[in-house]
Image (cartoon, rainbow, N blue to C red):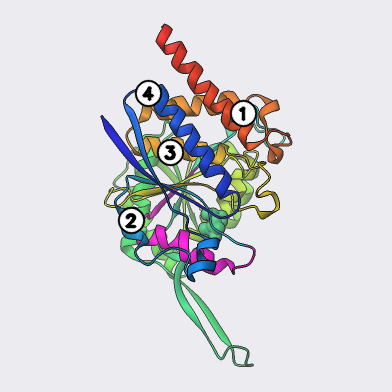
């Protein structure tokens, strides 16, 4: 029997509501499975921590996280602190510090959820976006000089390494090979970005030769947005650079019905360091503290976490419970046009898990 050591990092805004909801669901799962155990540690990092200590997380925070099996993260962002400080001081510090280079964003239209695409059937939109998560446009390399002067200059360098590009493309081809359609679309912009993106394309072709079973194509990022809207069924696994995938994954989440549902895994696939799981939505100050946040994005992220922890049965059970709940419009939160609260959705998912347990016990 294994105990999974989970770091809880709620962060800011509605992160402080959805992460406790996630813990409740994990406890309900553990109660339903005698072999499943979690040991939680809560880290109160984020905006309030910054106001007290001048840092978003302690200098040795990564060492504390390295001792865990997985991290469940809420969101980073604070109305009174510049976004680049909250982001680089917490979320990116963890992702880059723990080399979580593969960011995975599955998108499906869950039961009971409506896509804004008029003719889109559930089976037409079943994507996984693989986002390069360690370099590219988010390398952090750049600078400013002559601030406030007419000569002021600022740069953000998009940095791509052969090693970084190779590992993310190999990860994406492997993931595509594991999915039924074995279909991969490599997003590029090598028509305009004539150095790094051309290398990206070359490496894609090289890595593709290792995966003869995968059908793959290339799509320019701008054309990809139109294709997602007009021909969603032509896509399955999608791989893109850090910024391209950031943008495409918001579009994907919106096309699947709501940003409140979409999950993310920040993986270190080699498992040298713990991986981090988080809802895609931000801190949503407009609704924070009101109990209105949709916890489904967190619950679905927990499904990804359970899969990563080698608990496929619990993962499946939780996904099933989530789908039972989304299928019921009276359990929709405000982002889905409903009036349900975070607590009501959480209770409903826990009730499904408990019912599944009773059902198994009687079978
Ligand atoms: C995401 C988010 C972040 C990002 C924000 C909060 C900086 O949009 O996870 O997609 O751009 O990476
Ligand atoms: Mg984003």
**Marked residue nearer the N-terminal end (4 or 2):** 4
**Is 112 in the magenta?**
no
Q: What is the CA distance from the residue labelled 3 to the residue labelled 4? A: 18 Å
Check the picture and name the quadrant holding the N terminus.
top left
Relative image position of residue 217 (x, y in whole percent) = 46, 47
**Residue ID at (65%, 48%):** 289
Q: Are marks 3 and 2 in contact (CB under 8 Å)?
A: no
The mark found on residue 286 in the picture is none
Q: What is the CA distance from the residue labelled 3 to the residue labelled 2? A: 22 Å
The foreground one among 311 and 11 is 11
The residue indicated by pointer 2 is: 64
Q: Secondary structure at mark 4?
A: loop
The image quadrant where one finds ligand 1 is bottom right
The residue indicated by pointer 1 is: 326
On screen, residue 78 above or below 227 = below
Which range is magenta? 79-105
The residue indicated by pointer 4 is: 33
Q: What is the CA distance from the residue labelled 4 to the residue labelled 2? A: 28 Å
Residue 128 in view in this figure:
yes
Mark 1 against mark 4, which lies toward the viewer? Answer: 4
Relative image position of residue 253 (x, y in whole percent) = 60, 44
Q: Are marks 1 and 3 in contact (CB under 8 Å)?
A: no
Q: What is the CA distance from the residue labelled 2 to the residue labelled 1? A: 36 Å
The foreground one among 27 and 203 is 27
Q: Are marks 4 and 2 in contact (CB under 8 Å)?
A: no
The mark found on residue 304 in the picture is 3
Q: What is the CA distance from the residue labelled 1 to the residue labelled 4? A: 23 Å
**In the displayed structure image, the side of residue 125 where residue 39 appears, left or right:** left
**Marked residue nearer the N-terminal end (3 or 4):** 4
Relative image position of residue 355 (x, y in whole percent) = 50, 16
């Amino acid at each position: 029997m294994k105990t999974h050591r989970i770091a809880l990092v709620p962060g800011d805004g509605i992160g402080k509501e959805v992460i406790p909801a996630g813990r409740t669901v994990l406890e309900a799962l553990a109660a339903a499975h005698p072999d499943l155990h979690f040991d939680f540690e809560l880290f109160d990092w984020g905006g309030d921590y910054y106001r007290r200590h001048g840092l978003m997380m302690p200098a040795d925070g990564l060492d504390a996280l390295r001792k865990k099996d997985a991290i469940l993260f809420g969101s980073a962002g604070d109305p009174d602190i510049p976004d680049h400080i909250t982001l680089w001081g917490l979320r990116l510090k963890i992702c880059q510090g723990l080399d979580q280079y593969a960011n995975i964003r599955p998108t499906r239209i869950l039961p009971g959820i409506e896509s804004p695409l008029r003719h889109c059937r559930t089976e037409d939109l079943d994507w996984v976006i693989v986002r390069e998560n360690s370099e590219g446009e988010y390398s952090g390399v750049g600078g400013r000089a002559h601030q406030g002067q007419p000569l002021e200059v600022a740069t953000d360098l998009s940095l791509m390494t052969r090693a970084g590009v190779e590992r993310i493309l190999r990860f994406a081809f492997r993931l595509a090979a594991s999915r039924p359609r074995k279909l991969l679309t490599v997003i590029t912009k090598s028509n305009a970005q004539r150095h790094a993106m051309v290398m990206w394309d070359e490496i894609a072709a090289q890595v593709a030769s290792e995966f003869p079973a995968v059908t793959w194509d290339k799509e320019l990022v701008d054309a990809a947005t139109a294709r997602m809207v007009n021909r969603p069924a032509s896509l399955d696994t999608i791989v893109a650079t850090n910024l391209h995938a950031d943008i495409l994954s918001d579009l994907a989440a919106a096309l699947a019905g709501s940003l409140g549902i979409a999950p993310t895994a920040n993986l270190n696939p080699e498992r040298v360091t713990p991986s981090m799981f988080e809802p895609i939505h931000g801190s949503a100050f407009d609704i924070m503290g009101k109990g209105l946040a949709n916890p489904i994005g967190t619950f679905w992220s927990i499904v990804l976490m359970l899969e990563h922890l080698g608990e496929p049965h619990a993962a499946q059970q939780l996904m099933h419970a989530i789908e039972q709940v989304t299928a019921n419009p009276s359990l929709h939160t405000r982002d889905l046009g409903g009036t349900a609260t975070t607590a009501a959705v959480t209770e409903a998912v826990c009730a499904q898990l408990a019912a599944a347990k009773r059902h198994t016990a009687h079978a």
